[in-house]
Amino acid sequence: MKDISKKRIGEILVSEKLITDGDVIKILNEQRHSECLFGEIAIDRSLITEAQLLECLIHQCGIPYLDLMNYDIDKKLLDLFPEHLLVKCIAVPIERIGKYFIVAITQLLDDKSKEHFEEVTKEHVFFVLAKLSVVKNILNVYYAGKKDQKKKEMTDLGQMLLTNGNGKEEEKEDE
């Protein structure tokens, strides 16, 4: 693969002859009307595989790839980061080693996003690449579980509030 680290992902995919300039234009137009990543759209359109995207991202970002499929992720680490940051960046914290956090990302992050991770942790953050589908699945499962737990807590609270003060539900009077 050529030295492509300064190019955008669309340019990299074209230079590797994986997509055409016309594909780039179509993807960019679609991207303007969605919150999807360039690579995500290219994969959804079956123009490239996730493996091809990862190979290009590894060269673009200059950071290592880590397969998260058999990786145990501590849910407490996810709690340390705001949901909006992880979802926006499609990122998952996977490890804390001393004063370092390791965060799996699926795309090249801008400097502001990188700084946000360090501001949140007040520690150094080391980034690794991971498959988009795996990271999105982790985020979906984790945050869906948190929402289900919140619903349960709200239901329990609602039941508690519907008592008559002595822990028993009010009995309905017959009319």
Image (cartoon, rainbow, N blue to C red):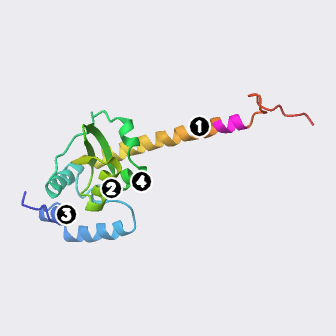
Position of 44 relative to 141 (above/below): below
Q: Which numbered tag is attached to residue 84? A: 4
Instruction: Give x and y (percent) for residue 150.
Output: 55, 41
Q: State which tag comes first along the sequence, 4 or 1.
A: 4
Kind of residue at badge 4: His
Q: Quadrant of the N terminus?
A: bottom left
The tag earlier along the polypeptide, 1 or 3, is: 3
Figure quadrant of residue 142: top left
Q: Which mark is residue 153?
A: 1
**4 and 1 marks in contact (CB < 8 Å):** no
Q: CA distance from mark 4 to mark 2?
A: 11 Å
**Marks 4/1: CA–CA distance:** 22 Å
Q: Earlier in the sequence, mark 1 or mark 2?
A: 2
In the image, 113 versus 151, the foreground residue is 113
Q: Which residue is mark 3?
A: 19
Q: CA distance from mark 4 to mark 3?
A: 32 Å
3 left or right of 142 in image: left
- Viewer-nearest of labels 1 and 2? 2
